[in-house]
Image: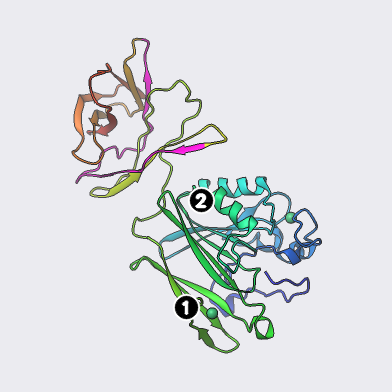
Amino acid sequence: MAARHERHVPKEDPLTTLLTEGIPYGIAVGNHDQAVAGSPDSATDFYNQFFGEAHFAGHDYYGGHYGTNNDNHFQLFSASGLDFIIVHIEFDPAQDTNVLNWADALLKQYSDRRAIIVSHFILAIGGNFGPQGQKLYDGLKANPNLFLMLCGHEPGEGRRSDTFDGNVVHTVLADFQGRTNGGSGFLRTLEFSPSNNVIRVKTYSPTFDAFEQDANSEFTLDYDMSRGGPLARVGTFTDICTATNLAAAWSGLAANTTYEWFAEVTDGDTTTRSACWRFTTGTSAVASAPFRLSLTRDVAGNIVLSWPTTVGTVYEVVYRENLVEGGWASLSGELSSSASMLSWTTPIDASSPPRFFAVRQVR
Ligand SMILES: [Ca+2]
Ligand SMILES: [Ca+2]
């Protein structure tokens, strides 16, 4: 955001943009939008007067804000089948942990959306993270849907790419306030090309009606959009200290499609993630019924699988020992439901390798 308290407030005009809501946008509060520059606890009255919740509330793309004002807020938007969440975070070198946790929870809540973080100062000209940028990256990098962070603050252009757990996060700095006439309107456009798995970044000045095309102004970022979307949560378990086996049904799988999955365990402070496994469904997908499969142990130590059912429907428990190779093998035979739940028990054979269970609806 421009480092001035006085500003012309643009009016989103549907007639000009041909978009029913005008051009959807969001704003990251900068140090000069704060009554005490650099203090996120000081007043941001002018910003909230013009760009507060009331200004955005009527727009479908507006997602909401943190706390009592609009200093930290987010938008949801979609284009060409790609769904995004973009979170705008106020300038705060110390990075308020509560705000960071709010952003982290949003990225998890919207794990099926591609996530962009925008904040005033994330990346320094030299390519190092600034203090806030480092905290934002460290605090949010475990979200596999995060792929892009955008910032200004330091006049100039720069970028870096970081990989965590196989997921690449690009951070891009573009700030033209030091140029002639306060930047001559120079702005960035990011064009997503799913068929090429790249984001094409361009730099344009409507004042000059010209592109700046040197290496730090026009470039492509690799971004794999081929997997059909970010990871989504399959199941969540709490109070698992004494659990030995946990299972969740993965519904809605498409046939002949490769999926990846992993497990994450947290005690509230530290989070540990497993390796990332993958499997490919067969010509007719298994476990396509939308129900939650629960797995417990009975007093004798047997495994008890149970799931909600429809009376008269026939199911079958299947298993596999390898999610990479082979297929699902029949285990239970046909099980007919006569109530709203069905349970099936099997002893544990300690000499067998670990097994993955699923329930198939036969008819
Ligand atoms: Ca604030
Ligand atoms: Ca340049």
Q: Tell me the residue at 48%/82% (across/down).
A: 213
What residue is pinned by disc 2? 141
Check contact, mark 2 vs mark 1: CB within 8 A. Answer: no
Is the CB–ligand 2 distance for label 1 below 8 Å? Answer: yes
User: Where does residue 278 sit, x and y in percent of width and height?
Assistant: 30, 44
Crowdedness of circle 1 by 10 Å Cα count: few (<14), some, many (20+)? Answer: few
293 part of magenta stretch: yes
**Residue stretch in magenta:** 271-299
Q: Is residue 299 left or right of residue 361?
A: right
206 up-or-down from 313: above or below? below
User: Where does residue 151 sit, x and y in percent of width and height?
Assistant: 60, 65
Crowdedness of circle 2 by 10 Å Cα count: few (<14), some, many (20+)? Answer: many
Which image quarter is the C terminus in? Answer: top left
Q: Tell me the residue at 57%/35% (across/down).
A: 269
Quarter holding residue 158: bottom right
Which image quarter is the N terminus in? Answer: bottom right
Please name which of the two marks, 2 or 1, marks the residue nearer to the observer: 1
Q: Which mark is residue 215?
A: 1
Quarter holding residue 299: top left
Q: Residue furthest bottom?
A: 208
